[in-house]
Amino acid sequence: MRPTTLLLAILGTLMGCQTSNSDRPNTSPLNHVVLIKLQQPEGINELLADCNRLLPTINQVDSYWCGKHFDIGRAGVDSDYDVALCVGFQTQAGYEQYLIDPSHLELVNKWKPRFETIRIYDVKDTY
């Protein structure tokens, strides 16, 4: 499966999710989707912990999830990543502030040298 097909599948699933106390889909208008493959997969849990510690606390973050690839044996499912995350924002200005926030920069500076690959998709929800 091509990375863009995977992204569409992830976002389609997200757009169909409902929050428990609202009719609003569990997504933000602007979504920053990142797929990361590490040089050393044994770092996955540490990366997840750092993402979960640093990213949701940034003021501009409207929605957030992070997780690792799981394999259920389906042919055609892209498995060429270790960690995926989605950070949502209400505005472009909020996203731009996130990019320069010290917590985001801490994460990037620590982990970027350990990436084998990173794929980033910025998506505007049309809901």
Image: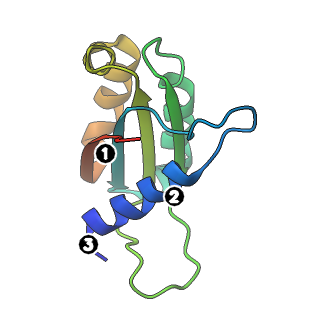
Answer with mark 2 or mark 3, whichever residue precedes in sequence. 3
Answer with mark 2 or mark 1, whichever residue precedes in sequence. 2
Answer with mark 1 or mark 3, whichever residue precedes in sequence. 3
Q: Which residue is mark 3?
A: 2
Residue 122 position within the rendered picture, expressed as x and y whole percent measured from the top left:
26, 40
Q: Which residue is mark 2?
A: 13
Which element is circle 2 on?
helix
Q: 119 and 26: which one is in front?
A: 26
Query: Which residue shows up at 46% across the image and 15% down it?
Result: 58
Which element is circle 1 on?
helix
**Residue kind at label 1, given as amino acid type:** Arg
Disc 2 to disc 1: CB gap under 8 Å: no
Residue that extends furthest to the bottom in the rendered view of this protein:
75
Q: Is residue 21 left or right of residue 120?
A: right
Q: CA distance from mark 2 to mark 3?
A: 17 Å
Judge the density around disc 3: few (<14), some (14-19), many (≥20) Cα neighbours within 10 Å: few
**Residue kind at label 2, given as amino acid type:** Thr
Q: Mark 1 or 3, which is nearer the eye? A: 3
Q: Is residue 19 above or below residue 58?
A: below
Q: Is residue 76 left or right of residue 69?
A: left
User: Which part of the image, by quadrant, shows the N terminus?
Assistant: bottom left
Q: Which residue is mark 1?
A: 114
Q: Is residue 22 left or right of residue 97?
A: right
Q: 115 and 2: which one is in front?
A: 2
Residue that extends furthest to the right in the rendered view of this protein:
21
